Image (spheres, helix red, strand yellow):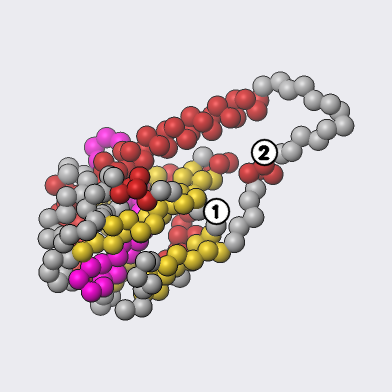
Amino acid sequence: MFSAIGGKLNFNMKIDKFLILILLSIFLLSFFTYWQFKRLSEAMPKIKKPEVEIPKPESIFQQKTEIKEFISPDGKLKFKYSSDWIEMPKESWQEINAEAKVLFFANKFKLEKAALASLIVQELDLEKEKSVKEIVEEIEKEVKAKNGEMEILNLEIKDKEADLKIKYKKETGPIFVSKEKIILGDNKFYLISIFALEKDWLEFENETNEIFNSIQLNI
């Protein structure tokens, strides 16, 4: 949920996570409104011929999935994900996060659960060398500066990478849960994030773990 585009980032990261989350909430509201309208229309009386079998709703939305692979433009970062993640225009996220290079942006819908998750891969330049711990600390400072709360539910730091599970919230507005991975490269780092509303997180947690377990970085 961070960003970088061209130029160096001196780690005074002008990134408002909560602006992004608010916009996502608007998107979610629109999606849920559509879903309620669809359910209402399905409940209305319908005229049908006796010999015609009306398909069940779950059969309409059932998809055959396959495993796809994301490979970063430099060929160094890779991971696998299911084809039912719907790839979105990177520009739509890039316009919000003008300081990040967005490499991948996708959404996954679970219509029967009215649940949505987002998968975002970003690349950020570093003006000077930073440790993974320092990057995490800067993220926390940035969230507090925006009057938000960032509760780290789980944190595992290795030499050049970190795995985090985070809860984001403000005094008002929805609560989001995110799993994020930070991987240091040469004068830059990658940030892979999957996040959803807190009430929906368990719907995506197992698949999130599978995606993160498939991440590879060849430097």
In primary-sequence order, the first of circles 2 and 1 is 2
Q: Quadrant of residue 73?
A: bottom left
Q: CA distance from mark 2 to mark 1?
A: 17 Å
**Left or right: 193, with 10 as reference point:** right
By secondary structure, the bulk of the magenta-drawn segment is best described as strand
Within 10 Å of disc 1 (Cα), the crowding (few <14, some 14-19, many 20+) is some
Q: Is residue 197 above or below residue 133?
A: above
Amino acid of disc 2: Pro
> Which residue is label 2 attached to?
57
Q: Quadrant where the C terminus lies?
A: bottom left
Q: Please provide percent x and percent y for residue 129.
A: 14, 72
Q: Position of residue 29 (x, y in %)?
A: 42, 33
Q: Secondary structure at mark 1?
A: loop
Viewer-proximal residue among 194 and 216: 216
Residue located at (25% from left, 77% from top): 159
Tag 2–tag 1 contact (CB < 8 Å): no
- x and y percentages locating residue 47 in the rendered image: 77, 21
State the mark number for residue 84.
1
Does residue 12 show up magenta in the picture? no
Over which residues does the magenta segment extend? Answer: 165-192
| Residue 100, image quadrant | bottom left
Is residue 190 at all visible to an observer of this figure? yes
- Which secondary structure, mark 2? helix
